[in-house]
Image (cartoon, grey):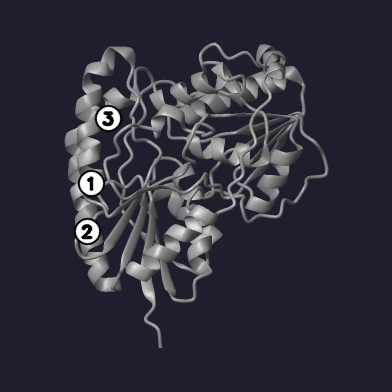
Amino acid sequence: MEHKKTILVCPMDWGLGHATRMVPVIEALKRRKNVRLLLGADNRPLEFLKQRYPELEVIKFPGYAPKYPVKGAMVLKMLSEMPEMKKQADKAHLFLETLIDDKKIDLVISDNRYELWSEKAKTVFITHQLNIQTPRYGKVARPALRQMIYSYIRKHDELWIPDVAGDDNLSGALSHIDHFPLRNYHFIGSLTRFQYVIPQLPERDPDILILLSGPEPQRTILEIKLKDQAFQSGLDTVILQGRPEEIHHIKMGNIEIFSHLPDEQFAGMILQAKTIICRPGYSSLMDLVWFGKRAIFIPTPGQTEQEFLAESLKQKGLYYFQNQKEFDLRKALTQAEAYHGLKMQNNGQALESRIDDLLENA
């Protein structure tokens, strides 16, 4: 009888997107008969994976999520918290080493968990952030930050990038660089939780669909602002809070609020909504381009990656954005009409090929 390979999939717990984009990876692994699959996560991603995959063993895997600043750049906030982040990363690494022994793990696939490398198992690191963006006044720190990140990536066996190679890509300068930290790197195509979903269409077509995501306090600050402006507009508005750990459904005049929706209903809501408003997080972007939907972006203040993506996509005429502080719903709805969005679907072949190779050589 063929020996089953035990594989751990573990996303970072900074918001929900790192977990949702692991769905295609998990689904591909589930289809292999010679795989025993384990999932590891913490906080909100842990709840999402428990609900999405009740049939799988989901392990509470400690993570570390720094608080987003109310003002200033997240990158600089991270630099100030490096000692504590290093301490927590070391603890997570030791936890992994023990888990590998206890669960007889052959392979670890992690999304932005830099510390999940090991000499006792093959490890794959997934990221689109190979060229970390810093604010203009923080450019002096960029080379040091890059070297530190690359030193961790080089401890892994493979690097997977959720995008396509070449000019017609999604992440731009974030992951299309001249010199990669690992020779064994692979573009595996964009990843979305909706790739294997049959949408369940709602009975109506909402004027506005607001997708909330990301860490506090900025997530709640944005929610309050958008609720107020949507109420004043009188437009039929649906708000998805992105909180799988909660179960509530509230109707307030022209606004309907869901804490969370199953993927089938979520996909249907995206397809039917006339306008989508969300953060330009990379996972959200991969979801939108799967459906070819237009959107209005509001970058998380101080998160340079989102600010970079929003600006570059606007310059290409694809998506309109406004900054959170000055956001004006009426103006945004008018201006967004000039932007046509982007459709990009991944057939999954690159991902399937990498997984087959891994199972053969792990």
Q: Does 214 sit left or right of 254 as displayed?
A: left
Location of mark 3 (residue) = 78
Sequence-first disc among 1 and 3: 3
Q: CA distance from mark 1 to mark 3?
A: 21 Å
Location of mark 2 (residue) = 118
Q: Does 224 sit left or right of 302 as displayed?
A: right
Occupied quadrant, residue 179: top left
Look at the picture and state if 38 lies above or below 81.
Answer: below
Location of mark 1 (residue) = 154
> Does the image show residue 110?
yes
Look at the picture and state if 247 lies above or below 136.
Answer: below
Between 87 and 250, the residue placed more toward the observer is: 87
Sequence-first disc among 2 and 1: 2
Q: Residues within 10 Å of mark 2 (few under 14, many from 20)?
A: some
Occupied quadrant, residue 254: top right
Q: Are marks 2 and 3 in contact (CB under 8 Å)?
A: no
Between 340 and 239, the residue placed more toward the observer is: 340
